[in-house]
Image (cartoon, rainbow, N blue to C red):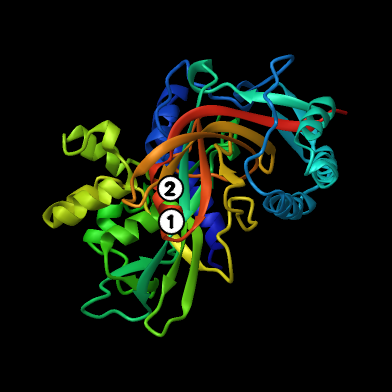
């Protein structure tokens, strides 16, 4: 008999798995949370796109921008590349309303025209935005309308294309046995949900966790190594950021971008250190975590393995790229929950940012506001109360992004019909 195509074989296995394991909606939901890497949600947490944004009727923010407008126009230009790839009738959900891709594209082109015309007239630009745009506000956690803003960046680390006594920690490309299963194919209740898995015989199993990959080295010998790094903490931070640049011994730069994840739930190593009493909440930052790991090398493997999530990379010509596959713009690109918020949306944020002093510590916090574009997402960015700002590339961006953690306000804008 002719051999079945692999995709049909996998499909039958998945169906058998779903039938045998998912007895009832409650068990299905529990399995989904376990396998998909999603955090268990509280009953009052925002769970649907229609609840993530609410229209603003009167209390508009003052649309003032603290950055140069060239960067904003650049981000809008990249955004239109994404929108132009879509069917013009593709619908985006803005809270209780929906808009077509054509409307979103026209809205952002019009916004770009306003910026060019009124870039040197702050008060008039504010007036024009209020006049021509509908404004929606993120509902936040449990509807309190507060959004926690954090920062991420593109790190630059030393690495090598070959392993030696210095460069001993491999960064992998995506394995061919990692598959993503769209659960909406099986039940309407699972619309927008998926799991990442591997197939072993007739079983569908969660993909390998970080400990299995990095400590047990289950992927060794498969030719998946893209580059070797000299510090496992660099490897972990690179995965948290989702992209990075590797400086090779000959001085050349290897640019890496996100390709896939193992589907395991992201667990913050900062939270692990807090729960163990090693760091206090008020002193928690990327810098304090790295400092602790440097001072306690005997604990590095235990702490890193406490996060089962793992990111696989691929080489990119440039970047970094967000989840809409366009280059990110420092200070203008943000990451939101891609299930709750419309991809590529024009936004506006008000928050406080850290100012780093000569000791590489936060000297003060200052208020800021600016227009942004929703061009990315992240494993830890879940819910209507979370937003991550892309800070840029290199050490300075890392210092500021690592300290960024403050509540603020998030708005999403679209031109009035």
| Residue sitting at the far bottom | 250
Instruction: Judge by depth and name the residue closer to the eye, 402 or 9.
Output: 402
Tag 1–tag 2 contact (CB < 8 Å): yes
- Asked if residue 96 is positioned above or below residue 326 in the image, the reply reads above
Is residue 261 among the parts visible in the rendering? no
339 relative position to 234: left or right: right
75 relative position to 26: left or right: right
- Look at the image and tell me in which quarter the N terminus lies: bottom right
| Point 14% across, 57% down: residue | 297
- Look at the image and tell me in which quarter the C terminus lies: top right
User: Which picture quadrant has residue 8?
Assistant: bottom right
| Point 62% across, 27% down: residue | 49
Local SS, label 1: helix
Packing grade of label 1 (10 A; few <14, some 14-19, many >=20) is some
Spatial CA span between label 1 and label 2: 6 Å
Q: Which residue is mark 2?
A: 400
Residue 7: give x, y in percent of width and height.
Answer: 55, 57
331 relative position to 115: left or right: left
Is residue 26 among the parts visible in the rendering? yes
| Point 70% across, 31% down: residue | 63
| Point 73% across, 35% down: residue | 92
- Asked if residue 256 is positioned above or below residue 291 in the image, the reply reads below
- Asked if residue 252 is positioned above or below residue 406 in the image, the reply reads below
Q: Which residue is mark 1?
A: 396
Residue 328: give x, y in percent of width and height.
Answer: 60, 54
């Amino acid at each position: 008999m002719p051999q079945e195509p692999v995709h049909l074989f996998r499909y039958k296995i998945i169906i058998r798995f779903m039938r045998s394991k998912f007895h009832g909606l409650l068990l299905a939901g529990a399995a989904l949370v376990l396998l998909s890497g999603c955090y268990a949600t509280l009953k009052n947490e925002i769970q649907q796109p229609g609840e993530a944004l609410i229209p603003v009727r009167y209390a508009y923010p003052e649309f003032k921008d603290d950055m140069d407008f060239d960067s904003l126009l650049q981000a809008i230009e990249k955004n239109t590349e994404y929108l132009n790839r879509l069917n013009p009738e593709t619908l985006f959900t803005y809270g209780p309303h929906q808009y077509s891709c054509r409307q979103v594209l026209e809205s952002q082109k019009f916004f770009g025209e306003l910026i060019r015309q009124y870039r040197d007239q702050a008060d008039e630009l504010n007036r024009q935005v209020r006049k021509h745009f509908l404004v929606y506000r993120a509902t936040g956690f449990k509807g309190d309308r507060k959004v926690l803003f954090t920062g991420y960046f593109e790190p630059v680390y030393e690495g090598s294309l070959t392993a030696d006594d210095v460069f001993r920690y491999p960064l992998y490309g995506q394995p061919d046995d990692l598959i993503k299963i769209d659960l909406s194919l099986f039940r309407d209740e699972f619309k927008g949900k998926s799991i990442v898995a591997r197939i072993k015989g007739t079983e569908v199993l969660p993909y390998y966790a970080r400990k299995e990959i990095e400590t047990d080295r289950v992927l060794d010998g498969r030719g998946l190594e893209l580059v070797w790094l000299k510090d496992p903490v660099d490897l972990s931070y690179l995965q948290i950021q989702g992209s990075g640049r590797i400086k090779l011994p000959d001085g050349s730069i290897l640019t890496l971008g996100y390709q896939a994840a193992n589907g395991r739930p992201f667990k913050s190593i900062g939270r692990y250190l807090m729960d163990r009493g090693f760091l206090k909440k008020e002193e928690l930052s990327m810098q304090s975590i790295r400092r602790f790991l440097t001072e306690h090398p005997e604990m590095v493997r235990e702490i890193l393995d406490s996060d089962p999530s793992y990111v696989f990379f691929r080489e990119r010509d440039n970047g970094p790229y967000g989840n809409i596959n366009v280059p990110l713009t420092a200070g203008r690109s943000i990451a939101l929950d891609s299930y709750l918020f419309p991809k590529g949306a024009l936004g506006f944020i008000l928050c406080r940012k850290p100012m780093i002093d000569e000791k590489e510590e936060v000297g003060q916090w200052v208020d800021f506001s600016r227009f942004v574009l929703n061009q990315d997402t992240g494993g830890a960015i879940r819910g209507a109360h979370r937003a991550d700002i892309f800070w840029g590339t290199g050490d300075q961006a890392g210092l500021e992004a690592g300290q960024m953690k403050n509540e603020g306000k998030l708005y999403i804008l679209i031109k009035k019909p």
